[in-house]
Amino acid sequence: MEALLFYIFSALTLVCGFLVVANPLTRNPVTSAMFLVLTIISMAGLFVLLNAFFLAAVQIMVYAGAVIVLFLFVIMLLDIHEVEKQPVNYFSVTVGMLALLSIGGVLIKAIVTSGVGDGLEAVTVGSTKKLGLSLFTDYVLPFEIMGVLLLVGMIGVILLSKKTLR
Amino acid sequence: MVFHDPTIAAVMHDTVQNSLLGPWGPFLMFSALKVVMAIGILLPMIAYSVMLERRVSAAIQDRVGPNRVGPFGLLQPMADGLKSILKEDFTPLHVRKAYFILAPALSVIPAFLTIAVIPFGSKLGNQSMVIADLNVGILYTFSVVSLGVYGIVIAGYASNSKYPFFGGVRASAQMISYEIAMGMAAVPVFMLVGELNLGKVIEYQANGAWLIFKQPIAFVIFLVSAFAETNRLPFDMPESETELVSGYNTEYSSMKFALFFMGEYAAMISVSALMVVLFFGGWTLPFFGLNETASTFGGGLIHILVFLAKVAVFMGLFIWIRWMLPRFRYDQLMDLGWKTFLPLALANIIITATILWIQHL
């Protein structure tokens, strides 16, 4: 049962992820964004199979529910027909391919050399409390640094979007 | 006839266990039964909410309202449904077809999915009355509710004309803004309860006071955000028929239009149910020993009825407010969400945390 679900969700993730960047039928950015939603939802399915319910819910809530809605918001305000008519930019395709191959190579190397273990025991079976506790005790420094990083990003965006600085 | 529930349930349990499905049998069958039951309650509730809306609006505006079909007009929802199905399903030529068909479905499905984690009763026989007793129940609800915006945004995009498009863009900004306030408003509730499971929230309230008395500010923020999330007046910016000729659903007709309508009412019902669970003790009542988990079949039924009655009160509130208040302006709506409710909700979290900290000293 779980293996079957794993294959279904990972196939969906891969196919939808492919259709986000290279849809053979249309170059409509809205379609890409919608396939990105599907990719994220199927990834949430994979998280559920790993017993990471919290992560799955947050993944859908933050990415599918908010970030991509904002993507759509921006895409809709652009002139989509212009974007669709633009020729394929071969330079970015080549660079993207190179990046993909190198990251893929690193990942495959890592998986092959580390060897597949017996699988870890699911320590936090959907327990949000444990996640919160370890975030605020063992990993409090990385957590705080990430918060500061996000804050910096936010302030930067506010600064850029302001037309005149007093 | 008296139902001696344990026996009935036990017999059913054994019959199913010995059938083809094996050990998963009872779980699958009872889950399927509960799904059918929940949808079977939800659909008539949607139909009669529309009916109630029309009668209440008529009463408020000193009209009669629909009273011709059946006694007191009680068969009006059937007539409405039949009409929606029989009308011509017209697709304008200029629309983006795939999205045009997808959008109504996208607005109904999330609203229906939300009820999966809501405990709508204590126990019937030995089955607890919640379809999926998730540990992260509330997060599931918020994530599914947050998907509801796609129906409207995609409808606005697919219609490929100006006013629906404005409706879609407004919806995306509005729903994201109020989702944050809504989520933040619910945080103190879970700080008090210490669990994200909705069943545990009800248990906590049954053992003490309802959370409305402990978290009135959170409730007010949650209630107003619920109005904004379901696009009801005074926050129906995406629809606003006076400026946008009914906004995102302008190009829709027949059953596709009816689906948007159903989606709106289903979302109202699920958000009402959520408020009942979070702030009004769910299926419990502090008298007649109704705080305990039901031990008899009749008790279980009474709990379900209590829950439905509480939800109905909120539906009444939704409808009443709609016909009493004028629409907000768009900038007022954004100011209210970002500059009033979000800081208020954050302050509420800090205050709750401080009180909890002092209590634990």
Image (cartoon, coloured by chain):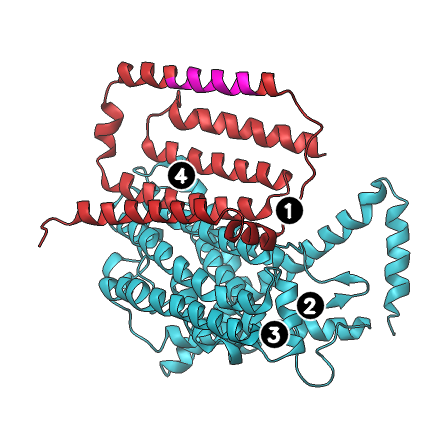
| Mark closest to the chain's N terminus, 2 or 4 | 4
Expressed as whole percent of the image width and height from the top left, the position of residue B208 reads: 63, 79
In the rendering, at what x and y percent does residue B325 appear? 32, 76
- Residue that carries the numbered disc 4 in the rendered image: B99
Q: Which SS class for mark 2?
A: loop
Residue annotated with mark 2? B121
Q: Amino acid at mark 2?
A: Gly
What residue does disc 3 label? B281
Give me the C-alpha separation between circle 2 and circle 4.
38 Å
Q: Is residue A11 above or below residue B353?
A: above
Q: Which chain is cyan?
A: B
Q: Is residue A37 left or right of residue A77?
A: right
Q: Say the numbered circle drawn on residue A124.
A: 1
Our reading of the magenta stretch's main secondary structure is helix
What's the residue type where badge 1 is placed? Thr
Label 3, label 2: how far apart the Cα atoms are: 11 Å
Q: Quadrant of the N terminus of chain B?
A: bottom right
Q: Residue at x 61, y 21 (%)?
A: A114
At label 3, which amino acid type do we have? Gly
Q: Residues under labels 4 and 3: Cα distance? A: 40 Å
Marks 4 & 3, CB-CB < 8 Å contact: no
In front of the other: B107 or A71? A71
Residue stretch in magenta:
A99-110
